[in-house]
Amino acid sequence: AHCHGDAAARIAVEAGVDSIEHGSFLTEDTLKLMKAKGVYLVPTRMAVYWVSKQADAGAYPQKIADKARAAAAAHGTMFKAALRIGVPIALGTDAGVYPHGMNAMEFGLMTDLGMSPAAALLAGTRESAKLLGIEAQVGTLEAGKVADVVAVPGNVLGDIHATEHPVCVMHLGHIVLQKAGT
């Protein structure tokens, strides 16, 4: 369920949804309920970041810009609380809110708020597959699973922003992008 507010998110969690997207104003009580019920948080950090930057650039009327900034500030606090509480997190971007090709920035935006690079990578792979119920087919590199692989320069555990510079992409076992020299 796409919810910024706590009341709507709590109703959705109590009704049995699998995930809450955004969650800017979630309280610790709702986050604890999400953990207890195994409900994923899909924070969409990139969407929040982009809208906030557009607000700062004057792209929105003042009233909307103020609301976007308030949501962004609350979102960061909520995300840190979700990490501390242990809410399951999957990566999602709400792509369409910002220009195409920037999805990998989500990893850095999550690690900027305290998530480890390894946990961010798992949020974008294994945990997202679990949330969607397709973990038997995708989400980890194992024999018999679909070969969707992204190769990047360097060690992403030391520099998560390397995910923003793919040098080779394999989809369904076929190379669909390979930069020269790789």
Image: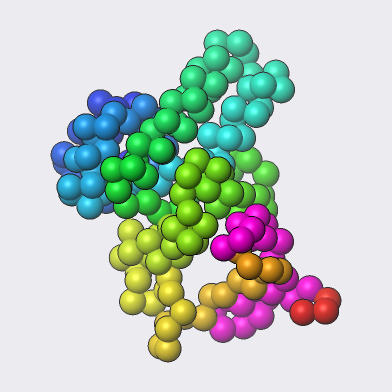
Which residue lies at the image location 40% right of the left edge and 54% below the top edge?
A: 90
Instruction: Give percent across and percent down for residue 70.
Output: 49, 20
Which residue lies at the image location 63% right of the left edge and 67% below the top edge?
A: 155
Q: Give the position of the N terminus as an image quadrant.
A: top left
Residue at the front extreme, as displayed: 158
Q: Is residue 160 magenta?
A: yes
| Among the 4 quarters of the image, the one containing residue 65 | top right
Instruction: Give percent across and percent down for residue 10.
Output: 22, 33
| Among the 4 quarters of the image, the one containing residue 62 | top right
Instruction: Give percent across and percent down for residue 110.
Output: 51, 46
Q: Is residue 15 above or below residue 182?
A: above
Q: Give the position of the C terminus as an image quadrant.
A: bottom right
Residue at the right extreme, as displayed: 180
Q: Is residue 79 left or right of residue 45?
A: left
Instruction: Give percent across and percent down for residue 157.
Output: 57, 63
| Among the 4 quarters of the image, the one containing residue 136 | bottom left
Which residue lies at the image location 71% right of the left edge and 22% below the top edge?
A: 57
User: Is 108 or 66 nearer to us in this picture?
Assistant: 108
Q: Is residue 68 above or below residue 144?
A: above
User: Is 90 or 3 nearer to us in this picture?
Assistant: 90
Q: Is residue 37 visible?
A: yes
Q: How is the image coloured?
A: rainbow
Q: Is residue 79 magenta?
A: no
Q: Is residue 94 visible?
A: no
Residue at the top extreme, as displayed: 63
User: Is 14 or 165 nearer to us in this picture?
Assistant: 165
The magenta segment is 157-179
Q: Is residue 121 left or right of residue 12?
A: right
